[in-house]
Amino acid sequence: MSGHTPGPWHIGMQPGPIIYGKNGEQVADLRGERKTLVVELDEAVANTKLISAAPELLEALKACRKSIRHAHNCKAPQAFPCSCDADSLWKQSEEAIERAER
């Protein structure tokens, strides 16, 4: 499997909501059935906004990982898991990045 479509992604609402890549390629179609209720359409639009931010969110998470440090009063490495959540944050971010890049 190749990597994801490079960002940035943008949202098109006609016939939308559809997410497009930077070169106009279709990334995701969230239109569903045309008999959608307004509430369902609002939810589809909210989902579209979150999905379209995915490439930037992934890059931001990778950048944030560089800043994860143990607090000055943390008991690491003597205690595991550590007492400041740095170990947990590191593991969570690692798992999220792996899921995104599979």
Image (tube, rainbow, N blue to C red):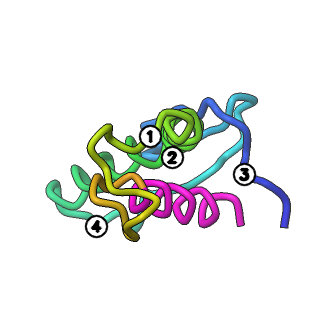
First reached walking from the N terminus: tag 1 or tag 4: 4
- Amino acid identity at mark 2: Ile
- Judging by the rendered image, the residue that carries numbered circle 1 is 69
SS category of the residue bearing label 1: loop
- Judging by the rendered image, the residue that carries numbered circle 3 is 4
From the top left corner, tell me how far across and down residue 28 is, in percent.
Answer: 57, 54
Left or right position of 54 against 5:
left
> Residue at left 75%, top 30%?
23
**Label 3 – label 2 distance at C-alpha:** 16 Å
**Label 1 – label 4 distance at C-alpha:** 50 Å
> Residue at left 39%, top 62%?
88
Which quadrant: the C terminus?
bottom right
Tell me if label 2 and label 1 are in contact, CB under 8 Å.
Answer: no
Marking on residue 13: none
- Judging by the rendered image, the residue that carries numbered circle 4 is 35
Start-end of magenta stretch? 87-102
Marking on residue 18: 2
Tell me if label 3 and label 2 are in contact, CB under 8 Å.
Answer: no
Tell me if label 1 and label 4 are in contact, CB under 8 Å.
Answer: no
Of circles 2 and 1, the one toward us is: 1
First reached walking from the N terminus: tag 3 or tag 1: 3
SS category of the residue bearing label 3: loop
**Label 4 – label 2 distance at C-alpha:** 17 Å
Of circles 4 and 3, the one toward us is: 3
Tell me if label 3 and label 1 are in contact, CB under 8 Å.
Answer: no
Which quadrant: the N terminus?
bottom right
Most foreground residue, 46 or 35: 46
**Label 4 – label 3 distance at C-alpha:** 31 Å
